[in-house]
Amino acid sequence: QVQLVESGGGLVQAGGTLRLSCAASGSIFSIDLMGWYRQAPGRERELAATITTNGFKAYVDSVKARFTISRDNAKNTVFLQMDNLEPEDTAVYYCYARARAHRMLLNLDYWGQGTQVTVSS
C-alpha cells in the first residue's frame, strides 16, 4: 500500500506564507496525480491544486494567483507553497495521490491524515 505523510501546517497571520510538504512511501509502483485538497469547518472537501507526473498543474480559482504546487518525482513528494494567505484559506489540508502499489493492477486514491492551516485576520 501507499502512505502519505504531510507536514508544514500551522498558524499564520493574513498575508503570511506557509509551505506544505507531503511524502509518499510504501510499496509504490508508480504515482500518477498528486495534489492537495482542503476542508474548512462546515464545508465539503474541495480541490486546491493538483499536479501530474509531467508537471501539468491545476488550481481552484480562489488560490491561482497565490499558491504554487510542485513535485519531486524522484522522492515521491509534493509541495504546496502558499503565499499571501487569507483567513478564507483556513482549513485542514489533505495530501492526495493517485498511485499504483506493487502487485496491484489499478491506480487507487490515497489520502494523508491532514494538516491544519489557520490564517488569522
Image (cartoon, rainbow, N blue to C red):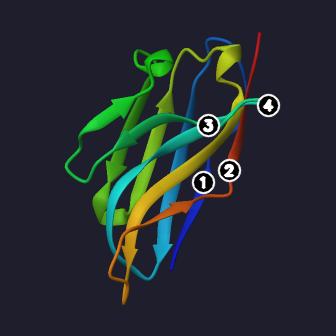
> How many badges with numbers are in the image?
4
* Badge nearest the viewer, 2 or 3: 3
Q: Residues within 10 Å of mark 4 (few under 14, many from 20)?
A: few
Instruction: Classify residue 88 as left or right of residue 1.
Output: right
* Residue 120 vertical placement versus 104 (above, below): above
Q: Find out whether the residues at labels 1 and 3 contact each other: C-beta distance under 8 Å.
A: no
Q: Find out whether the residues at labels 2 and 3 contact each other: C-beta distance under 8 Å.
A: no
Residue topped by disc 3: 38
- Amino acid bearing label 2: Gly
Query: In whole angstroms, how far apart are the C-alphas of marks 4 and 3?
Result: 10 Å
Nearest the eye: 121 or 91: 91
Label 4 secondary element: loop
* Residue 20 vertical placement versus 81 (above, below): below
* Badge nearest the viewer, 2 or 4: 4
- Amino acid bearing label 1: Glu
Residue topped by disc 1: 6
